[in-house]
Amino acid sequence: MRALVVYCHPSPESFTAAVRDTVLSRLEARGAEVRIQDLYARGFDPVLAPDEWAGYLDEPGNRVPVAEEAADLRWCDTLIFVYPTWWYGLPALLKGWLDRVMLPGVAFEMPKAPGETIAPGLTQVTRLGVFTTCGASWWLTRWIGAPGRRTLLRGVRLLCAPRCRTAFAAHYLMDSSTQASRARHLARLDRVLDRFLA
């Protein structure tokens, strides 16, 4: 198993960091090769600059500004996102990672003829995991539509292997969480990961 963990949180003391550590521990227990992209720690620039946009369709030159990130994405067979849900969606930094790294020739293939749609480019990815925290409740997040979850588990999922296994776990009401609720969530996350990585 070759796992890429894309981690996005500004604080090393956050509960999201504890979620990341649980994910890394379960991957290690399974003997996985792991690469982690800690977007804040590495100072990842989320802005798709005008020159990058101008060369967006220029394969493989389009991946030069994000060569390491694109190589990790092409290398993995297990793709895991760990992040806090802000305003019901992805943090801007993680959205910028998608904009800049999920490129033609890396994550998908452009249409070849009029009327066609893009084709999946991450068909080596057979597992896609999303592990997050949400300040809102489960019902409010669902009523809004959970756009972050949908972007990853529907949008990115369509680019992966046809029978790609998925996993999702969120700690809701994070802003009013307790030590007990956080401990329960990490225990649940262990169980989710055991099934996901089996």
Image (cartoon, helix red, strand yellow):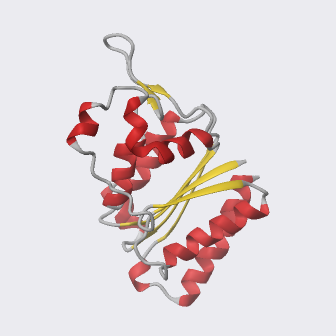
| Residue 104 at x, y percent in the picture | 41, 30
Mark yes or no: residue 89 visible: no
Between 185 and 2, the residue placed more toward the observer is 2
Residue visible at 46% across and 84% down? 177
Is 168 displayed left or right of 66 in the figure? right
Between 140 and 41, the residue placed more toward the observer is 41
| Residue 62 at x, y percent in the picture | 37, 33
Is 110 displayed left or right of 168 in the figure? left
| Residue 151 at x, y percent in the picture | 40, 47
Residue visible at 55% across and 36% down? 160
Tally of marks:
0
Vertical position of residue 5 compared to residue 123: above or below: below
Vertical position of residue 140 compared to residue 125: above or below: below
Vertical position of residue 148 compared to residue 158: above or below: below
Give the quadrant of residue 55: top left
Residue that extends furthest to the left in the rendered view of this protein: 50
Mark yes or no: residue 127 visible: yes
Residue that extends furthest to the bottom in the rendered view of this protein: 179
| Residue 176 at x, y percent in the picture | 41, 85
Residue visible at 45% across and 72% down? 172
Between 178 and 97, the residue placed more toward the observer is 97
Give the quadrant of residue 167: bottom right
